[in-house]
Amino acid sequence: MRAGTRMQAAARIAFMALVAAMLFLFFTNDFGLVDIHKTSIVVAVGVDASESGYRVTAQAAVPTPASGEGSASYTQVTGSGATVADAIDDINAKTGFYPKLAFCNLVILGESCAEKQLFTVLDYFYRNDYVPLTALVGICRGSAEELLAQKPSDGGMSSSAIQRAMSEELKNSANASTINLKLLAQDAGSPSRSSYMPVIKYSGGGGGGSTAATPAGTSGSSDGGGAGNSAEFTCLTTAAFDGGRYAGELSEEQSFALNLLRNDIRLAVMNVEHDGKNYTVALKNNSCKTEVGSEGGMPVLKIKFRAIANVQAAETRPAAESSANSHLVPEEVLAAASSAIEQRMRSLAEFCVSNSCDLLGAGSMFYRRFYSDSLALDGRVIDVLKTVYDIRVGSVR
């Protein structure tokens, strides 16, 4: 009994010592995560190419007291250098802190980066041990610095609004070709050698850079923003790359087809026309499979798509005035939907062939199944690819 009592007393003492140590660490240490006085909490990075190298814009969240009112503010800092790493070091020289990128969830490339080799621009983000490979990647028209300076309608950070336009929900509805650093490198390193990323665009807006002067190296900070000059961000089109070379921009329809092919689409909405009337059709239970074959050593890609459709809106009689079977889609509308999807698939394939950019992934599949034939074609499967389509859209029963 005495031995058990001594063990219990020792356990209590050890527990109290552990609690005391944890409280001491809690109030005196940051566990190596964030020290606000020595580093910045960078949530997004924009990269622009220039004649002398690169300009890197870091958007950082500025912590506010818990009792403060209003939304959290942010600041932007821009540095220049011969490389992206050199430009980030310039941010350190201007501000006195070195940006930690452990919380960076968004990398935006300016339009000027399309003239460079893609992975030369992104090299720093793959070499840096602190950059999460789950960070989203996109390219924009114009300057990435200017894009990040726009103010969304909620008065928050532009990076948050852009990430919402590239969210998994929009990816799963075929509205955005969302991709991260890891998947981008995997696509480019495959036998197809092709990769893609969403094109970020905005409408409206007034530059955050027009705010009052801020500390050295800072280009602007949020002040809540007015609704009159707020920006709205979309990612409806897609930039295509072949071996890191910019190959062109997919239209909204081509991007829709690419998303059906490459992503797990839960619900996609598209507009079709039949007999001069518009129908908005929702596609559920989407299944898109691709299979490659060989005919005389030449690649043949079969695209098989199946979906269940219902009409969400139509210019014909409203559902409330129709029969109880208004959820059924007329065969003519189903045929129009199937035809529209096939047209978009064909348009995507034509883009890939004319730009030698294998976003269809045919080269990778052909390489795995017909290795010797792939070697004979020197890996350029897309240049001689024949595509066969099997598209069927059925109605909800």
Image (tube, rainbow, N blue to C red):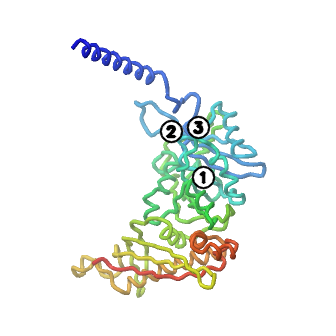
The percent position of residue 127, horizontal first and vertical second, equals 64, 45
Using a 10 Å C-alpha cutoff, classify the residue at mark 2 as few (fewer than 14 neighbours), some (14 to 19) or many (20 or more).
some
Residue hosting label 2: 73
Q: What kind of residue is marked 2?
A: Ser
Q: At 63% across and 81% down in the image, what residue appears?
A: 298
Using a 10 Å C-alpha cutoff, classify the residue at mark 3 as few (fewer than 14 neighbours), some (14 to 19) or many (20 or more).
some
Relative vertical location of residue 134 with respect to residue 94 in this rendering, above or below: below
Residue 245 quadrant: bottom right
Q: At 59% across and 73% down in the image, what residue appears?
A: 366
Is 259 positioned to the left or the right of 296 in the image? Answer: left
The percent position of residue 89, horizontal first and vertical second, equals 69, 38
In primary-sequence order, the first of circles 2 and 3 is: 2
Mark 2 near mark 3, Cβ–Cβ under 8 Å? no
Q: Nearer the viewer, mark 2 or mark 3?
A: 3
Residue hosting label 3: 100
> Which one is in front, 5 or 228?
5
In primary-sequence order, the first of circles 1 and 2 is: 2
Q: CA distance from mark 3 to mark 1?
A: 17 Å
Q: What kind of residue is marked 1?
A: Ile
Q: Nearer the viewer, mark 1 or mark 2?
A: 1
One can see residue 317 in this view: yes
The percent position of residue 359, horizontal first and vertical second, equals 58, 69
SS for dot 3: loop
Is 211 positioned to the left or the right of 53 in the image? Answer: left
| Disc number for residue 108 | 1
